[in-house]
Image (spheres, helix red, strand yellow):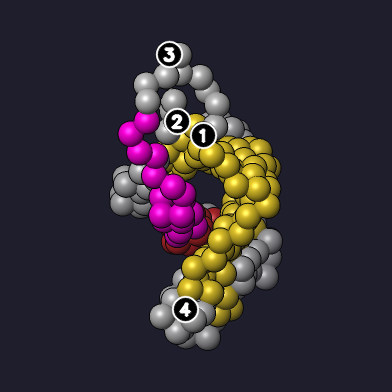
Amino acid sequence: MNRLRWAWERLTLYLPVLLMGVFAMATYWLVRSTPITGTTATAVAVQHQPDYFMRQFAVSTFDAQGQLKSEVKGTELRHFPDTDMIEIDQVKIRSFDEQGHLTTATAQRALSNRDGSEVTLIGDAQVLRAATVSANGKEQPVMTFKGEQLHAFINTEQVSSSLPVTLTHGQDQFTADRMDFDNRKQIIQLDGRVKGVLFPGHTR
């Protein structure tokens, strides 16, 4: 029981950094790198058709020292004026934190509203934090989140999934049918068929 509790505490410790860091970076790029639609003539009937798009694109941001901070790639980006939503196909996101630790996110599609307050990864969604070494020299294994859909509310720092999810920390693994995570309250709720598998030899 103590071992399970410790492993779960490690998962909840890294989940905020893993998920919210990636989505904050993604929405930062989405809001600032797409054109702002101005006042246009009123259409007779508004249709769900994109008013602009980008294909086979890659946009990178760098810090003051010229080091890569974030990168967003996709096969196509579309903006829909009727809903003011941005949609990206085959999205690939890379983000480096201040310590140079890499987090990546991939999905078949990504959706974001105009102000970037809500972002959804859809289809084979995966968020991966690469293995790291802490300040005290302790190795931290790879951590991943996998699911068919991940919905993030950036302003309130909440992440949810109504579909099955898998969380891994090294060899340890947790699965559930649904997930709700509140970064501010540091509360994660797993519902449905919740299972945890812990492997021997996992050191503190």
Q: What residue type is labelled 4?
A: Gln
Disc nearest the viewer among 4 and 3: 3
Camera-side mark, 1 or 4: 1
Asked whether the viewer can see residue 112, the reply is yes
Q: Mark 3 points at which residue?
A: 44
Relative placement, left or right, of 182 versus 178 is left
Q: Which mark is residue 51?
A: 1
**Residue 125 seen in this snapshot:** no
Which callout, 4 or 2, points at the residue further toward the start of the chain?
2
Residue 150 is inside the magenta segment: no
Above/below status of 201 relative to 104? below
Contact (Cβ within 8 Å) of mark 1 with mark 2 = yes
Q: Which circle marks residue 81 in the picture?
A: 2
**Identity of the amino acid at label 2?**
Pro
| Camera-nearest label, 2 or 3 | 3
Give 79 or 121, whichever is nearer the viewer.
79
Cα–Cα gap, marks 1 and 2: 7 Å
Q: Residue furthest top?
A: 44
